[in-house]
């Protein structure tokens, strides 16, 4: 069967011709801005059926959009927002900087990062999502705080950002409806992984939110959607290029490893509890053995956000200096009041003692400890398996309409590189007793690989969560351990002795 000849484009505004160009076009054949704009507008309005959009999405997987087409598609999704991007007051207000993560197991960075950066004088407007699949969602975590509302309208959202300095809210139906409709179709047609479509879907909501610049966290590893650093670099590069093309200047990305859960808590309330603990004032002997990676990543991203803010007090400082500034601010305890201000402004019940929220004891489940049956070093943690196990315990959802149990989850008791003896607790499972079957306990045990020789995790540098930075000017640059901010060297554990 001969391949059809490239389309002659007799009618630029015909969905069949647009699909044909995407499927059979030559490398140099691209959609015009007008074609893409018409196609997305018509689909959002219901004039183009799902089956034609599905055909075009699949064609995009086999012949991906160019950087220009990706930028145009992103703008078309933004344009579907009634009234266009948010308009923020600038006179007398600090700059706006946001952050986005591609998601991972135990990724609770936003809960600390937003109030941390806000406490240092930068506005942080953050549109976040709910959990779907093996990763948790920031909104689900915050909604485990009694009364917390993350479904504010855009006027309420902006008021809190302007008055408090930060707000974390879900994307409402009015924000990029074209993306909402297209993502639902991508999810059921196996076209989620297409890189240009990922780029447009992620960035359109951020552009509609309209910050001045953005920091991206693109994760890779056995707990992330991108399994290799090469895949993560491709997505990060696409998003950095598109972000700049859409006026988010600068757009910067970090590539971060997800070979173990971030911090020690997996599950909504437990992750909030871990963050509240970190935001309390530190004593000199603060134990960070289980969340050194979370703290280091928060402080590095905060430093980059301060650097991108353009505020005079930060303009002549280095990323290392500003990461240290963020670390000192976090240790001081000044971040917790900002988080409480944000939570109260979003409807949360007043916190209890020590500015913390404590659930009723009757709502919590008794924990089931998973103990080591052999001695050795923890050389691997099957992170995605732990993520899916948390979903099965009730903390996540497989379908978008499902509810979540805020008090189901897993607490890690060990991290990569640690030495374990027989009987040591590896993790603790929390869920209704009927969900923690013997098979579930055996599966949890199998998530921790113990070996006599500690080869793969024998030094702090092998555990470094941040490995690369991606910018428009310099592309993908490796970040050697020796050049990472001092915070990393302070927090990361030294090699374990033999068991």
Image (cartoon, rainbow, N blue to C red):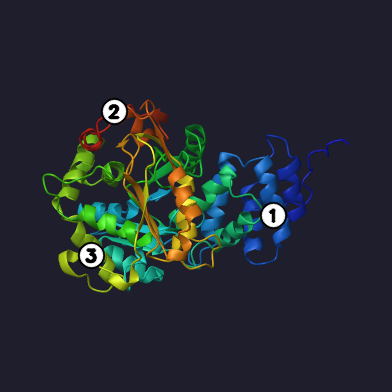
Tell me whether circle 1 and circle 2 mark residues in contact (CB < 8 Å): no
- On the image, which quarter does residue 157 sit in? bottom left
Mark 1 or mark 2: which is in front?
2
Kindly identify which residue carries mark 1. Answer: 54
Image location of residue 208, percent across then percent down:
45, 58
Mark 3 or mark 2: which is in front?
2
Which residue is nearer to you in this view: 70 or 38? 70
In this view of the protein, can residue 246 be seen by the observer? no
In this view of the protein, can residue 362 be seen by the observer? yes
Ranked by sequence position, the earlier of labels 1 and 2 is 1
Tell me the number on the disc at residue 498. Answer: 2
Which residue is nearer to you in this view: 431 or 398? 431
Residue at (61, 55) in percent of width and height: 187
Image location of residue 226, percent across then percent down:
51, 41
Q: Residue furthest right?
A: 1
Image quarter in which the N terminus is found: top right
Image location of residue 32, percent across then percent down:
65, 47
Answer with left or right where residue 143 lies relative to residue 496: right
Residue at (65, 43) in percent of width and height: 61
Kindly identify which residue carries mark 3. Answer: 340
Image location of residue 62, percent across then percent down:
68, 40
Residue at (69, 39) in percent of width and height: 29
Residue at (23, 40) in percent of width and height: 323
Q: Secondary structure at mark 2?
A: loop
Ranked by sequence position, the earlier of labels 3 and 2 is 3
For the residues labelled 1 and 2, the Cα–Cα distance comes to 55 Å
Image quarter in which the C terminus is found: top left
């Amino acid at each position: 069967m001969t391949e059809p000849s490239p389309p002659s484009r007799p009618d630029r505004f015909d969905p069949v011709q647009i699909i044909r160009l995407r499927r059979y076009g030559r490398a140099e054949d691209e959609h015009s801005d007008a074609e893409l704009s018409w196609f997305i507008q018509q689909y959002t309005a219901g004039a183009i059926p799902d089956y034609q959009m599905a055909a075009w999405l699949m064609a995009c997987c086999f012949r991906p959009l160019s950087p220009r087409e990706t930028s145009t598609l992103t703008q078309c999704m933004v344009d579907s927002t009634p009234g266009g991007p948010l308009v923020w007051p600038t006179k007398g207000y600090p700059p706006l900087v946001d952050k986005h993560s591609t998601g991972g197991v135990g990724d609770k960075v936003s809960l600390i990062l937003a109030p941390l950066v806000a406490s240092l004088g930068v506005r942080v407007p953050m549109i976040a999502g709910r959990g779907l699949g093996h990763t948790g969602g920031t909104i689900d975590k915050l909604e485990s705080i009694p009364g917390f509302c993350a479904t504010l309208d855009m006027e309420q959202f902006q008021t809190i950002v302007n008055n408090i300095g930060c707000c974390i809210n879900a994307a409402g139906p009015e924000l990029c409806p074209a993306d909402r409709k297209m993502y639902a179709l991508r999810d059921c047609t196996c076209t989620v992984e297409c890189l240009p479509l990922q780029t447009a879907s992620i960035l359109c909501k951020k552009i509609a939110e309209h910050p001045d610049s953005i920091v991206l966290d693109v994760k890779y590893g056995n707990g992330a959607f991108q399994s290799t650093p090469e895949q993560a670099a491709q997505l990060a590069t696409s998003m950095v290029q598109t972000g700049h093309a859409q006026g988010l200047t600068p757009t910067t990305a970090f590539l971060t490893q997800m070979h173990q859960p971030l911090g020690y808590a997996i599950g909504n309330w437990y992750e909030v509890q871990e963050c509240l603990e970190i935001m309390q004032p530190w004593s000199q002997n603060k134990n960070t053995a289980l969340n050194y990676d979370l703290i280091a990543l928060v402080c590095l991203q905060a430093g980059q956000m301060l650097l991108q803010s353009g505020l005079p007090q930060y303009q002549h400082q280095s990323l290392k200096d500003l990461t240290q500034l963020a670390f000192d601010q976090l240790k001081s305890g000044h971040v917790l009041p900002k988080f409480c201000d944000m939570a109260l402004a979003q409807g949360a019940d007043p916190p209890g003692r020590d500015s913390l929220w404590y659930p009723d004891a009757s709502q919590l489940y008794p924990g089931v400890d998973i103990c080591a049956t052999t001695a050795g070093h923890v050389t691997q943690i099957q992170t995605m398996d732990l993520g899916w196990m948390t979903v099965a315990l009730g903390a996540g959802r497989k379908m978008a309409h499902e509810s979540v149990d805020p008090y189901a989850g897993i607490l890690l008791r060990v991290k990569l590189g640690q030495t374990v003896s027989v009987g040591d607790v590896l993790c603790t499972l929390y869920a209704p007793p009927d969900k923690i079957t013997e098979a579930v306990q055996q599966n949890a045990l199998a998530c921790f690989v113990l070996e006599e020789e500690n080869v793969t995790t024998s030094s702090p540098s092998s555990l470094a969560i941040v490995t690369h930075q991606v910018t428009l000017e310099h592309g993908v640059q490796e970040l050697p351990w020796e050049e990472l901010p001092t915070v990393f060297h302070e927090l990361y554990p030294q090699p374990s002795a033999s068991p």
